[in-house]
Amino acid sequence: MLLSGSDIIIRTLIEQGVDTVFGYPGGQIINVYDSLYKYQDELKHVLTAHEQGAAHAADGYARATGKVGVVFATSGPGATNLVTGIATAYLDSIPVVAICGNVPTTQIGTDSFQEIDITGITLPITKHNYFVNSIEELADTIRDAFKLAVSGRPGPILIDVPKDIQIAKYEYEPMAKVTPFDPESAKLKRVSEAAEIINEAEKPYIYFGGGLVSSGAKEEMLKLAELIDAPVGCSLMGISGVPTDHPRFLGMQGMHGHYASSMSMNDADLIISLGVRFNDRATGNINKFAKKAKIVHIDVEGAELSKTVAASVALRGDLKCTLKNLLPLINKSEKKAWWDRINSFKADEEKYLDNREGLTPRSALLTLNKHLGENTPVATDVGQHQMWAAQNVCFKTSRRFISSGGLGTMGFGMGAAIGAQMATNEHAVLVTGDGSFGMCLNELATAVSYKVPLTILLLNNGVLGMVRQWQTLFFDKHYSNTVLNRKTDFVKLAEAFGAKGEAVTTVEELDKALTNAFNEEGPYVVDCRIDKDEFVLPMLPPGGSMDDIIVKVEK
Amino acid sequence: MKKYTVAVLVNNQYGVLNRVTSMFRRRQFNITALTVSETESPDFSRITVVFDGEERSKELLIGQLYKLPDVKSIKELHRSETVSCELMLIKMRNEPETRNEIKAAADAFNAKIVDYTKESIVYRLTGDSAKIDEFIELMHDYEILEICRTGRIALEKGKSTIRNVTNL
């Protein structure tokens, strides 16, 4: 049938299984919004307060489901406002498709009103991007984008559609939903090399990240762990990939990782690395990282193998397929001595735990845990609260920890929590800090408009806590520009937005407030006051190794 | 630091060169020579890049280039297994006192005169990059007005091609 370009965009999205789009209209994408009006029964559009929020929402939607998140923005500032959101998705390998309007092709390159070279700007932060030059290629470009976004290592794709292409008419043929390129196992020769090393290991440690989550290889990994009797740890991006209370799970490792997890990794003679990229926050000083260990590294992205840490055996392939080929080659064994060692690390970790009475970051999150359901998505912003959440929140289901790992985007949480809530239809939680929340709290308006059931646990300490922590430890307590000292009343602020809120200063008050929040149909701000000098511990100093780990700080 | 020559087969579309060279910029490689041309198939172009770097960074760079959907195939071209050459145009000041000496050198290098005026002579020279360097070195004794070099182009010896090496 003969349709306008803007109708083709909407029809192709529906054809590709999209049910929700996040975005913000404007002059150069007005035609697409007109088509949205026409197809509003088939495709829900969520109007955010700012394009950045829309980008984070699409990202949160994708993280929670593995499906492609879709965001619309107009040309110029609309498009540039997506940049932080796209970069966030890129660094964490999240499948997002961003569709931007642009000025008509006849005006491209003339600096017309709200014209910007967004394909140029997003070149280094997209997996790929497209400038649609003709109506003929429009539908297939969108299909290609969907295929590419979820194939191999996922990532964000941007499509720039000039206004005249949105207006032009062309024959539209519905097509089937695209499927990702077939996942492939690593080469069998490499798989058997890996098996050999794994079978020889006495102190193996399985280390997984976001790649395991996106490959859906949890069961295969746990089978491997059973066979070789190994502990399992993860990077920040791996959190919620296995249930937090799994007996083999030691938690996140790295700069602020669980003591037992980081120590076991450091002590291991083999690290089986699954879908991780050995970021500096995970390794600390690369020259002192896990010196005793051989490394078997499996990743779908060849460019990640031996990028920062040299692998003994590097396997490029889909994790699920590769592990399936690997498992039959693995001998069953028990590692009693190794577990004695791990258990002693766990006992040490227990000793270092913060069990102070009263409202502390840890007690706040343990209180939150009591309110979480099996499938509750918990989003975070970035900073101390993010690390406390990573350490203390309990997850049962994969894809429920929604956090900006690679880019570390303050302001990510509000949009992402809204996206994750809409994707899962579960009551959602945002754990945030007063710094991060201040960046994108305008999305409270969105959450109110769409009655998003969202508990916002605001760990409010009046300072930029993570930077302050570094200033305390490494900059002689020069608290340069980290004391916010703002007069914001977050409860009144919530009310001004049409939401509810309450401030709490004790664990009992927090518990009650969370009950209220979880019973609420819309967003609910719990302003939880904590001390400004709380620390995220343990901590590997930047550039430090496990020998430098800080487990206690005398104040 | 070593010198590397890498051929990259890419989709023949606008913007692709930018994507490829942008990857060099992001990893802070300086490109010393670059040629781009359409290939035996109009769907693909071939980019030949010469750059200096460490072995490991070169490998990482190639890994990063493979991530680009427009990149179809990559081949590192080792000197012993490739034929390569370069083309140069060089414009010299034409003066009676130096004319014969320049001509003698040009003859020895098989450089052809492609433009001749009272004030200037343009020579065309092809050959491997080292030979061209040597000729330029000689010409420094006289007045060079302008130089333009294409950069190295290279093909593997024998029947193997870039299209049958990797991920096409």
Image (cartoon, coloured by chain):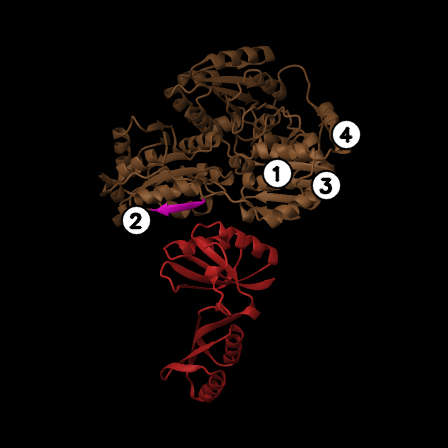
Looking at the rendered structure, the kind of residue marked 2 is Asn
- Chain with colour red in the figure: B
> Where in the figure is residue A423, as x and y percent of width and height?
43, 26
| N-term-proximal mark, 3 vs 4 | 3
B114 vs A9: above or below: below
Looking at the rendered structure, the kind of residue marked 4 is Asp
- Chain with colour brown in the figure: A
Query: Mark 4 and 1 residues: CB-CB less than 8 Å, in contact?
Result: no
Q: Nearer the viewer, mark 2 or mark 4?
A: 4
| Residue B149 found in image quarter | bottom left
The region drawn magenta spans A127-131
Q: Nearer the viewer, mark 2 or mark 3?
A: 3
In the picture of the structure, the residue carrying the numbered disc 3 is A201
At 34% across and 40% down in the image, what residue appears?
Answer: A100
In the picture of the structure, the residue carrying the numbered disc 2 is A133
Q: Nearer the viewer, residue A346 or A477?
A: A346
| N-term-proximal mark, 4 vs 1 | 1
Q: Callout 2: residue from which chain? A: A
Measure the C-alpha gap from mark 3 to mark 4: 16 Å
Q: Nearer the viewer, mark 3 or mark 1?
A: 3
Measure the C-alpha gap from mark 2 to mark 3: 56 Å
| N-term-proximal mark, 2 vs 4 | 2
Q: Is residue A505 visible?
A: yes
In the picture of the structure, the residue carrying the numbered disc 1 is A281
| N-term-proximal mark, 2 vs 3 | 2
